Amino acid sequence: MNPIIETLTGMDGLSDQVVAMDLLISAKSGVRNYALAVTEAGTPEIKEILTRHLVEALDMHEQISAYVVEKGWYHAWDTNEQISLDLNNINTALNLPTL
């Protein structure tokens, strides 16, 4: 998003959070999909390839998780803090000016 528009709408910083959290959700989905695919692999060669991809997907998920936790955008071990953050983000979205 354009930095000027982000500032005017109060979204500066929130855009990065939205993108990072969306990436985290996609990474989680990728891990699940690879894990399922490994269990359905028809040959040892395919299973080996899918397992390698699963390990890479787990590594990526770990890196993204560490990033969003470090930024304070994700509180996996503090449900109350995460709910508070989510409610704050919801209120920010609801109060965006309409164009």
Image (cartoon, rainbow, N blue to C red):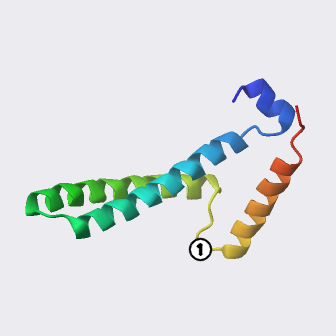
Residue 98 at x, y percent in the picture: 89, 36
The residue indicated by pointer 1 is: 77
Q: Quadrant of the N terminus?
A: top right
Q: Residues within 10 Å of mark 1 (few under 14, many from 20)?
A: few
Front residue of 18/34: it is 34
Task: Judge whether 38 appears above or below 30 on screen.
Answer: below
Total labels: the figure holds: 1
Task: Locate residue 57: give its quadrant.
Answer: bottom left
Task: Locate residue 73: give its quadrant.
Answer: bottom right
Q: What amino acid is at disc 1? A: Trp
Residue 78 at x, y percent in the picture: 65, 74
Residue 33 at x, y percent in the picture: 37, 61
Front residue of 79/51: it is 51
Q: Residue at x 59, y 74 (%)?
A: 77
Front residue of 34/64: it is 34
Q: Residue at x 29, y 59 (%)?
A: 54
Task: Locate residue 5: give its quadrant.
Answer: top right
Task: Judge whether 16 appears above or below 87 on screen.
Answer: above
Task: Judge whether 14 appears above or below 58 on screen.
Answer: above
Q: Residue at x 57, y 59 (%)?
A: 69
Task: Judge whether 89 appears above or below 44 on screen.
Answer: above
Q: Quadrant of the C terminus?
A: top right
In what element is the residue under mark 1? Answer: loop
Q: Is residue 4 left or right of residue 20?
A: right
